[in-house]
Image (tube, rainbow, N blue to C red):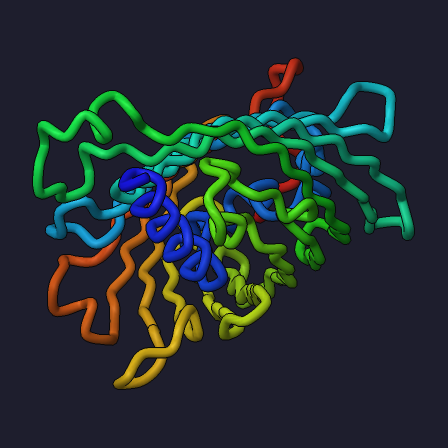
Amino acid sequence: MKTRNILTALLCMIGLAGYAQQDAGFSMYFFNPVYINPGYAGSRELFSGTLVHRSQWIGMEGAPTTQSITVHSAIPNSKVGLGLQVYNDDAGPMKNTGIKLTYAYHLKVTENAKLSFGIAGMMNNIRIGWDQINIDDNTDPSFVGNDANSWVPDASAGLYLYKTRFYAGLSANHLLESKFNLTSSPGADMAKFSRQFYLTSGIVLPISQNLDLRPALMMKYVKAAPMVTELNASLIFYQKIFIGAGFRTGKRIEIDGSDNMLIGIAQIQLTNMFSLGYSYDYYLNRTGTYNSGTHEICLGWDISGVRTKMSNPRFF
């Protein structure tokens, strides 16, 4: 009974906090849009992928870390794109490891633009480890080898309109709003995934022959939480070097104001195949006084079966 009561209370807190943020929010999401919109899968018309590591709140014990590897590709001689993502999100006592399969169908709507519809199915392994929780009596048999563990199915869908220098997307994640099912105790059903809606858009504006400007917008809505809005812009030098900054607001409301942050972003196209990106988040609230910010690094690749240079630069 003691174990059940404590676990129920913990799950309720996690469930309530989840309305504000359950999934890791990547600052370089526009280098890996398939993470939030399955309609992106196959849009680069190459075998593409990203490997991302994000370390949040550096200097704080138990701070969240996230790893993700995503691959996707257009199927030759078809309108179909397929994708696969494996991810791990470690936030103190709660861990989520999952796998996602993505299907997208691409239609040509104008001479230079396409519209795709994507769906994704996923399985999440939700775990809570007692070794990450302060327990008065570590010898209590109730907490020895009794970690909570559950497999949770879920789904997402999205629309993605794109051309060489523009994109717009609308997507919804956690369509099933699956419960974590870690215990049958009363009140534990509050711990579940909450449906999330994303609106994204970006454009590349030419400034000179070797300089472009890429502004981008992301808006995220979750029921019973402030809307997250992120604005960023990058300068693109020689279509190879991206230097930019962003501002994110509205993740949650604090006593002294909103949870806002500044974001610095840099990416370089190492070769025709590989790119490397880095971002740094600086918190503008009280959280920022207790940590050294958030670091994110991203390795991307585009692999073609034909040994030739790409005819168009890959801005998105």
Residue furthest to the bottom in view is: 256
Q: Is residue 155 left or right of residue 253?
A: right
Q: Residue at x 87, y 24 (%)?
A: 78
x and y percent of residue 151 in the render? 53, 28
Check the image and report above or below for 309 versus 250: above
Left or right position of 245 against 143: right
Q: Taking 236 as reference, is 50 above or below it?
A: above
Number of numbered discs on residues: 0
Is there any visible trace of residue 45 in the rendered image?
Answer: yes
Please state which of residues 213 and 232 is positioned toward the viewer in this rendering: 232
Could one spot residue 299 in this view of the protein? no
Q: Nearer the viewer, residue 269 or 67?
A: 67
Q: Measuring 68% from the left and 53% from the top, which residue is drawn there?
A: 172
Question: In the image, what residue occupies the spot 41% across and 60% down?
Answer: 17
Q: Quadrant of the N terminus?
A: top left
Residue 140 in the image, given as x and y percentages of width and height: 14, 30
Question: Looking at the image, which residue is at 20% across and 68% down?
Answer: 287
Residue 43: x and y in percent read 71, 38
User: Could you tell whether 82 is left or right of 25 in the image?
Assistant: right
Between 312 and 265, the one lying in front of the other is 265
Q: Residue 304, position in %: x, y?
A: 62, 20
